[in-house]
Image (cartoon, helix red, strand yellow):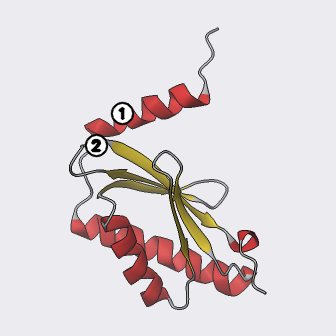
Amino acid sequence: MAEITLGDLYQFNKSAMAQIEPLDQLSINVAIDEIATYITEESLLHNKAYWMLLNNERKDYTVIHPLTKEGIKAELLETIINRGLILDATKQEDGAYEIWIRDPESKENFVYYLFDYTNGIVEA
């Protein structure tokens, strides 16, 4: 049986996303609202105060400190849209969101992960 390495799987998924059309504005709003609701609930119930939007391939790391659901929605939407066209946003089993974005200039697709980063922040 052939083995598929993680790098190969990522390249496969990246290529497969080339067949996907970007989300329309209504779908984007629904996805962002779902993510903001989840972050708000996790922040309130489990004291998860910081979230990271990460793409290792592009060395793109953004830390988000949510205060209100509406603030999260506005900042998250702007942050993601600044990176490109949203192809998909799916919550993973571990609670992270996998967000596929297409660079509008290069047409290349990139996966970003949005996850709890509270333990990665030191406040002195």
Type of amino acid under label 2: Ile
Return the residue found at the far right.
Answer: 124
Return the residue found at the far front.
Answer: 124
Work out whether 101 lies above or below 71.
above
x and y percent of residue 38 in the render?
Answer: 56, 74
3 with respect to 97 (left or right) = right
Q: Does the residue at mark 2 contact the one at mark 1 (Cβ under 8 Å)?
A: yes
Residue at 39% x, 71% y: name it. 79
Give the Cα separation between the discs numbered 2 and 1: 7 Å
**Residue 88 or 84: which is nearer the viewer?**
84
Type of amino acid under label 1: Ala
Quadrant location of the N terminus in the rendered image? top right
Residue at 38% x, 53% y: name it. 88
Residue at 23% x, 47% y: name it. 21
Work out whether 50 lies above or below 86.
below
**Residue 29 location, quadrant:** bottom left
Instruction: Classify mark 2: helix, strand or loop.
Output: loop
**Residue 52 location, quadrant:** bottom right
Instruction: Classify mark 1: helix, strand or loop.
Output: helix
Work out whether 43 lies above or below 111.
below
Work out whether 50 lies above or below 62.
below
Residue at 36% x, 71% y: name it. 30
x and y percent of residue 9 in the render?
Answer: 52, 29
x and y percent of residue 103 in the render?
Answer: 28, 50
49 with respect to 79 (left or right) = right
**Residue 26 or 76: which is nearer the viewer?**
76
**Residue 63 location, quadrant:** bottom right
Q: Dot 2, how many residues are within 10 Å of its Cα: few (below 14), some (14-19), or many (20+)?
A: few
What residue does disc 2 label?
A: 20
What residue does disc 1 label?
A: 16
Quadrant location of the C terminus in the rendered image? bottom right
